[in-house]
Amino acid sequence: MKILKFLTSLALIVSLCSTVGCRRQTTQTPADIVVKGGQIYTLDATKEWVEAVAITGGRYVYIGNDGGVDDFLGVETEVIDLAGKMAMPGINDAHVHPMDGAIKDLFECNFTFTADPQEIADTVTRCVAQNPDAEWIRGGQWGSNFFVDHDIESPRQWLDRVSGDKAVVLSDDSVHNAWLNSRALELMGLDKDTPNPPGVEIVRNDLSGELTGLILEGYGYLRGLGPILDSEEYKTAAQHVCATANKFGITGIKDASANAIQVGEFLKLDRRGEMTVHFASALETPYGARETGLDLEELIQQRDSLKSNNVDTGFVKIFTDGVPTAARTAAMLADYTTENDEVVATAGHMHIDEGQLTRDLIALDAEGFTVKIHTAGDRSVRVALNAIAAARAENGASGLRHELAHAGYVNSADITRFKTLDAVADLSPYLWYPSPIIESVIDAVGRPRGAQYWPIKSLLASGAPVSTGSDWPAAAADMNPWGAIEAMITRQNPAGDYPGSLWPEEAINLQQALQIFTLQNARALKIDDKSGSVELGKLADLIVLNQNLFKVPTSQIGDTQVLRTLFAGKTVYLVKE
Ligand SMILES: [Zn+2]
């Protein structure tokens, strides 16, 4: 409605202007901001590149050349001279766990995904020494293949040796699996007599039954048992999320699984006028196996009480399976490899069966929720598509574009179903290129099937809606999108520190990658009516880059630096020159 009104007034100005032949006369109402002298990639097919924009009330009132924008200059107008630099719409990250990432950045004990035992021992020892008063040390993230590559008989006792009197919990790179020391197990009330919670495996020694300290699919489960941050820490974390996003040129994020406390922090930020991103939140549902329906009333209550101008809570997250790494917890259509002697044949498993998922989907779709379904294996992808098909059959076309998160393994028979069902493939290009975690996946799934990972080109060719996200802090060190954009084009490790390429036949081009990261992801956040492209009446979510992505070698795209980020016309990040 706002946009309509705005466009009407704009049309009035333009028509007045043309009847008096006013070009070059400053009969235009002066704009708040004029951005000029640049190469602005608009993502609007009718006007792909422009030199200048004018912004009033946070929205674009002019898009065109430098000559035309001068009509919008007034004495109070702020002028941003791009000096030939490239600008484009802000990036949207459609799958991220921002509070977990911020908490990791700010309050946890961190080592790299490739850390060896010595490095982990040194890091934990240092964190223990630096935090004498802490009861807990949380951190990570050990590589998915860490316990395949390193022969550690009791991970728990190994960790005890470096953890002093602290309770230590370390997550893996997928943030699905956890490694605990004895003190942590004790404080969480877990011992050899504790039965496995649904969908979770508390790993035990085959002979003694003692806990090894590893808990597969344990991260979400432990969150309910472990230490909780205080409100001041949550507030700091939410602010860190916004600042970190803006630094990378991100102006919209979709939290892939958030609880009420986490969403509440962003709501408070928005009420204080401090939000500098559009925030969409997939409300979390119980993790792990579930045989009962969801608490719809609770979800509706959260949705209705936690939304604001920049916070949209009309989304729900459901986990259907785990990860296709050495843990072998993603649900596959065929068995994982059994080359490693200690591994029994498995095709992974679903947390919830197809009947339950279908009932959830029908109910959530009917209530107007868009559902993000974690589907890491080709079986969970198929089951989720079946459930969406059932929802469409029952409720008709709701217009809600439910998402299959990760969807890296898609059986060729299922590719065209995304378009048919208007279901979104929510892909993870920040992690899907040759790296240790991908090696772990290919080892577990086996060649050649394992290396046929994320068929994005085929999905796009079939007309499938596609979105992308960092999944930070799962397997991505940060939210920086530029390496991911490069990897979509090269299918190679953008940092150049791991050889090879991952299914290069599925590479796409730069235009396609940028389209997904701006407009398509805006659609996933349901902000495409007001953001995602440079178009008249849309919010000026605009970023300025240090290089023109179309003019540098593809291998340099990952090095892109953001110089300035505007959120609704306001500069929220600026590199001082
Ligand atoms: Zn995720």
Image: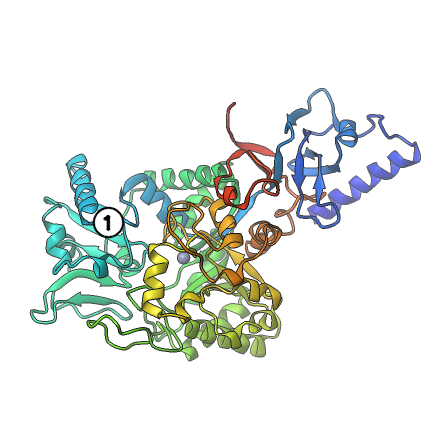
Horizontal side of 518 relative to 256 (left or right) equals right
Q: Quadrant of residue 391?
A: bottom right
Residue under the point 41% across and 76% down: 356
Q: Nearer the viewer, residue 364 or 89?
A: 89
| Label 1 crowd (10 A; few <14 / some 14-19 / many >=20) | some
The residue tagged 1 is 227
Query: Which quarter of the frame holds ligand 1?
Result: bottom left
Any part of residue 279 in sight: no
Could you tell me how many numbered marks the image carries?
1
Please identify the quarter of the rendering in which residue 549 is found: top right
Residue 532 picture location, percent across and down: 61, 48
Q: Residue furthest front?
A: 500
How far across and down, in percent of the image, does residue 274 sit? 49, 36
Using residue 519 as the reference point, say whether residue 261 is left or right of it.
left
Q: What residue occupies the far top of the structure in this picture?
A: 75
Residue 125: image location, x then y, percent: 15, 41
Residue 478 horizontal/vertical position (percent): 40, 45
Camera-nearest residue between 237 and 155? 155
In the depicted structure, whether residue 360 falls above or below residue 38:
below
Q: Is 487 positioned to the left or the right of 187 in the image? A: right
Name the kind of residue labelled 1 in the image.
Pro
Residue beneath the point at 45% across and 42% down: 268
Q: Secondary structure at mark 1?
A: loop
Q: Which residue is found at the position 37% from the left and 41% from the top?
A: 237
